[in-house]
Amino acid sequence: MPTPIPSNAFVLPLTVDDTAIDLQGHASNVEVVRWISRAAWAHSRALGWDEAAYHEHGAWFVVRRHEVDYIASAKLGDELLIHTWPSALGKASAERRHIITRPADNAIIARAVNMWALVDIQTGRPRRITPELQRTFDPARFG
């Protein structure tokens, strides 16, 4: 059963522009991955974790894995909503879910999950997720 969108999921609206369109005339798969990454970072910034905050903290999240189910095509000019929320936290990793919708016809364009690892900015090595990050990205807040 597909994961429902939490009522307090972060939402990033976007319009499909010509740079997103591939040779088949729809938004490319690579662009969908770019959109979910943009949404994840926009949500982090909205929660107070922008680039400066991560630098001050000495660690930031990097993507380790993307899993995307492409369900419908998005075309030039489509107005889309990218819904995203934290869905799990480990000792040094975090899972985030995304659902891209087209409100005009209630279509789901894609569903995605990505795994993030918290890494030390200086060394690039994994670090434990701190209590501050746990409070901010606690999946219980978003479900």
Image (tube, rainbow, N blue to C red):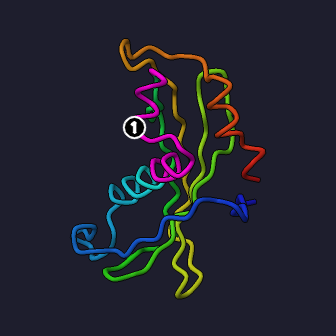
| 103 displayed left or right of 134 | left
Residue drawn at (39%, 37%) of the image: 51
Q: Is residue 33 above or below residue 95?
A: below
Q: Is residue 23 above or below residue 62?
A: below
Specify whether residue 57 is painted magenta: yes
- Report the number of numbered marks: 1
Inspect the magenta stretch and tell me whether residue 48 lies in it. Answer: yes
Q: Main secondary structure of the magenta part?
A: helix
Is the residue marked by circle 1 packed among few (<14), some (14-19), or many (20+) residues within 10 Å? few
Above or below, 63 against 142 in this view is above
Residue 74, position in %: x, y? 40, 75
Residue 100 rendering spot, x and y as whole percentages: 52, 66
What residue is at 56 percent from the left and 56 percent from the top?
98
Q: Amino acid at mark 1?
A: Glu
Expressed as whole percent of the image width and height from the top left, the position of residue 114 reads 53, 43
**Quadrant the N terminus occupies:** bottom right
Looking at the image, residue 101 lies above or below residue 127:
below
Q: Quadrant of residue 124?
A: top left
Q: Nearer the viewer, residue 1 or 35?
A: 35
Task: Determine whether, in the image, residue 110 is placed left or right of residue 90.
Answer: left
Query: Range of the magenta residues?
Result: 40-58
Q: Residue furthest bottom?
A: 104
Tell me the residue at 48%/32% (across/down): 61
- Please tell me whether mark 1 sits on a helix, a strand or a loop: helix
- Residue that appears at 69% across and 63% down: 5
Instruction: Please provide percent x and percent y for residue 21.
Output: 26, 71
Look at mark 1 in the image and give the residue it sits on: 51
